[in-house]
Image: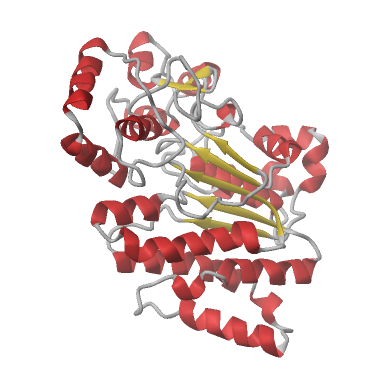
Amino acid sequence: MKKIPTGIKSFRKLREENYYFVDKTRMIKDFLERGSEVTLVTRPRKFEKTINMSMLSEFFDITKDYKEIFKGTKIMDTPYASELNQYPTIFISFADAKRDKASIVSTIKDQVLKEWDRYVYVFDDLSKYEQNKHDFLESRLMNYSNGNLEGIVDSISFLMDKLKDYYHKEVMVFIDEYDTPFIEAHTKGFYEEVRGGLSGLLHNSLKTSNSLKYAFITGIQRVAKENIFSDLNNLVVCDVTDQRYAAYFGFDSDETKELLEYFGLELNNKVKEMYDGYHIGNGDIYNPGSLLNYVDTKELTSYWVNTSANTMIKDGIKKSSRDFKERYKELIEDGYLDTEVNLQISFYEVESTPTLWGLFVNAGYLTVDQVIDLMDGYY
């Protein structure tokens, strides 16, 4: 009997320790065939973003030998099986960059230092200039008392350059929950104190480095006004209305039915009503986090957790116009609403009615049933 993978975030652990496994590895094939330099996928919480990012990282990581982990998976039946463990890979998660400013800065520095330590050998033979830059960045990364990120904006791109020099291959970069520190800083009132350093760190990794092969990034919403994605010629943004990658985040009906039956449950109308509330791309998707909790507890209830996105929604409703409150009441009473939604910019960057509805959609509280009209990114 397989174990229930509730809360599992490591693809390696999922495969090695006999957890139930829904094979999403053909996502790797799609990722390589699309060849987009930078891909951003936005999804609500608990939609398997982290496990998919772990899967990508483990597949490409040149320091690993994971033939056994990927043995029997769908990707190994494709020509791209030869890409297994062939690239220097950086995997960073900002999922825990929360609470106060000091905690956010410390978490981000810890994530970067983790990768620096993993590849410490690429810093063995540096020129005098490179050594000075290394020492400067390392001192800033290890300084947890100054509470800022400005001094480390080149820390990821510097590592990327040295990885390329060492392996003679460009670098795969995977950044999970990239927008968590932005959202946390906004809701806690210190957004302006971290935005510059955080934006610079991400932008320099994705744009100014000449060592990038491909980057895949996940989050809840697109941070548009900052310069993270500016000037990127080959950026693909896949929100919840986009068919690209739609099959890989969340469980479809067949996957859900198979999961429930394996653990002695059935996909009945009550389960559908509780967990089948998402329309991603062209299909209906179940929330995997909620389903796995249901399988574990056998209790048909909501498993949402309180997040800063929730706080932002509550604050947005409080400050919203009378028209929004009337439309919100209409939504609650009727269960649906025709309205203008902006998914192309985050609510905390531009506080408007369309971006507030967009936050509802991005956070998973509403789903897009139909695109009535598409014009300049509005739905």
Give the image location of residue 208, x and y in percent.
64, 63
Among the 4 quarters of the image, the one containing residue 328: top left
Q: Is residue 268 left or right of residue 328?
A: right
Please provide percent x and percent y for residue 70: 69, 42
Tell me the residue at 31%/34% (across/down).
Answer: 356
Residue 132 appears in the picture as rendered: yes
Residue 138: x %, y % from top left: 53, 80
Figure quadrant of residue 303: top left
| Nearer to me, 229 or 336 | 229
Q: Residue at (57%, 71%) from the top-left corner?
A: 154
Residue 81 lies, in percent from the top left, at: 79, 41
Q: Nearer the viewer, residue 240 or 208?
A: 208
Q: For the C terminus, which image quadrant?
A: top left
Left or right relative to 38: residue 291: left
Which residue is situated farthest in the front direction here? Answer: 376
Colouring used for the render: secondary structure
Q: Is residue 237 above or below residue 53?
A: above
User: Which residue occupies the foreground of this view, 100 or 349?
Assistant: 349
Residue under the image location 25 percent in, 17 percent down: 331
